[in-house]
């Protein structure tokens, strides 16, 4: 890649000693130079996107920390390179970035927002990248409004001096009270970055609107981390990203209660949708092998593991059946020649 070539060029310019080694001072200098170069390159790309799509300054400011990442996901889904995504692609993207919903009312709301934005699109059925940003902005506003009363109550209770702002420690206390404390080092690091992004002035304090923005982004981030982990586990099972997305949609369609789990009857329906045939006792045996906590229900990742086992079992039986057929042909041919 061009980034790698530029990095190699920077390294080649460093001063080496008589045995070809680079001093720690030179190495630190090179690392900082490379970071600055990357930051400058990212800024140029961000402004190129803003100019190309005529994104307003206010929207650009709001989405700048995520702009390149969102654009990359958008272009990956834009397989026909039309610069537009349809409703299914937008819903897939929203789930990928932390807006995955299992509740039917929430799904309906997302579709309504898509239709609102799509009406102003140049295409009758699809939206552009600025349209996508508008959808995300509207969904964030709706979700933040739903949290405002609860968060405001905690905020006002901790605002002892009535300054209208809280410090980082007080904000973290609210995160814990609403159940959004980090559960991993990755989540801790992500939350720290969000505090820095939201605190543009570097004051170390946050007004209610900034705290709501942070809580919304943290919720999205936690869902993103979970989705990334699921995709990584699926890849380790040998399941492609597209197949994982297809199975996730099937899982959500069968999870009519939005509980996040499926029982044996729903798994039977999944096999029927996939036109896979398997005797119930065999399916139950595989189900029980995957269901380690013996709850009688499978989460999505467990469902993926089961589908993989079912596929392998069916493939093995098909191979055996095909082998038997070939053997029968050979036996028949030998018998005819006898």
Image (tube, rainbow, N blue to C red):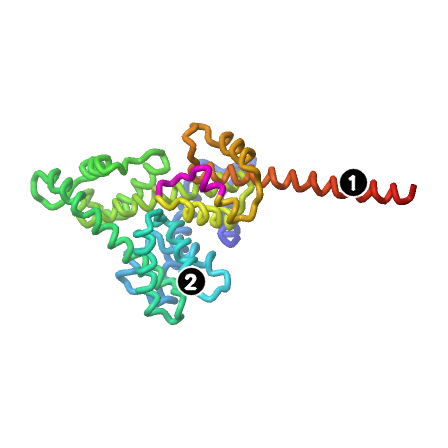
Relative height, residue 134 to residue 37 (above, below): below
Q: In this orientation, which residue lies closer to the viewer: 170 or 117?
A: 117
Q: Which residue is mark 1?
A: 327
For the question of whether residue 12 can be seen, the reply is no
Relative height, residue 72 to residue 289 (above, below): below
Per the rendered image, the range of residues in magenta is 258-268
Q: Earlier in the sequence, mark 1 or mark 2?
A: 2
Question: How many C-alpha atoms fall within 10 Å of the one at disc 1: few (<14), some, or many (≥20)?
Answer: few
Quadrant assignment, res 229: top left
Q: Is 141 situated left or right of 43 in this image?
A: left
Q: Which residue is mark 2?
A: 86
Q: Residue at x 78, y 40 (%)?
A: 327
Q: Residue at x 23, y 50 (%)?
A: 144
Q: Which x, y percent locates residue 277? A: 58, 43
Q: Residue furthest left?
A: 161
Q: Is 242 situated left or right of 336 in this image?
A: left
Q: Which x, y percent locates residue 227? A: 41, 43
Q: Which x, y percent locates residue 110? A: 32, 56
């Amino acid at each position: 890649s061009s980034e790698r070539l530029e990095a190699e060029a920077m390294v080649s310019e460093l001063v080496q000693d008589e045995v070809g080694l680079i001093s720690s001072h030179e190495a630190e200098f090179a690392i900082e130079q490379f970071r600055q170069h990357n930051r400058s390159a990212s800024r140029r790309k961000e402004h190129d996107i803003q100019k190309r799509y005529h994104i307003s300054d206010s929207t650009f400011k709001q989405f700048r920390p995520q702009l390149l990442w969102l654009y990359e996901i958008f272009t990956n889904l834009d397989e026909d390179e039309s610069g537009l995504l349809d409703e299914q692609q937008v819903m897939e993207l929203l789930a990928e970035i932390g807006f995955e919903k299992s509740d039917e009312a929430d799904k309906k709301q997302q579709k309504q927002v898509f239709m609102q934005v799509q009406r102003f699109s140049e295409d009758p059925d699809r939206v552009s990248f600025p349209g996508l940003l508008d959808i995300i902005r509207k969904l964030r506003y709706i979700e933040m409004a739903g949290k405002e009363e609860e968060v405001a109550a905690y905020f006002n209770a901790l605002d002892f001096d009535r300054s209208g702002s809280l410090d980082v420690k007080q904000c973290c206390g609210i995160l814990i009270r609403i159940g959004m404390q980090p559960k991993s080092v990755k989540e801790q690091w992500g939350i720290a970055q969000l505090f820095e992004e939201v605190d543009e002035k570097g004051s170390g304090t946050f007004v209610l609107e900034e705290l709501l923005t942070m809580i919304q982004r943290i919720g999205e981030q936690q869902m993103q981390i979970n989705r990334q982990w699921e995709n990584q586990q699926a890849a380790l099972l040998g399941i492609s990203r597209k197949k994982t997305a297809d199975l996730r949609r099937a899982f959500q369609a069968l999870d009519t209660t939005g509980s996040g789990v499926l029982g044996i009857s729903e798994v039977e329906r999944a096999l029927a949708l996939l036109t896979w045939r398997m005797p119930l006792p065999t399916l139950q045996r595989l189900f029980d092998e995957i269901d380690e906590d013996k709850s009688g229900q499978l989460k999505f990742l467990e469902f993926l593991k089961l589908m993989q086992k079912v596929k392998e079992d069916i493939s093995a039986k098909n191979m055996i059946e095909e082998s038997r057929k070939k053997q029968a042909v050979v036996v028949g041919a030998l018998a005819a020649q006898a």
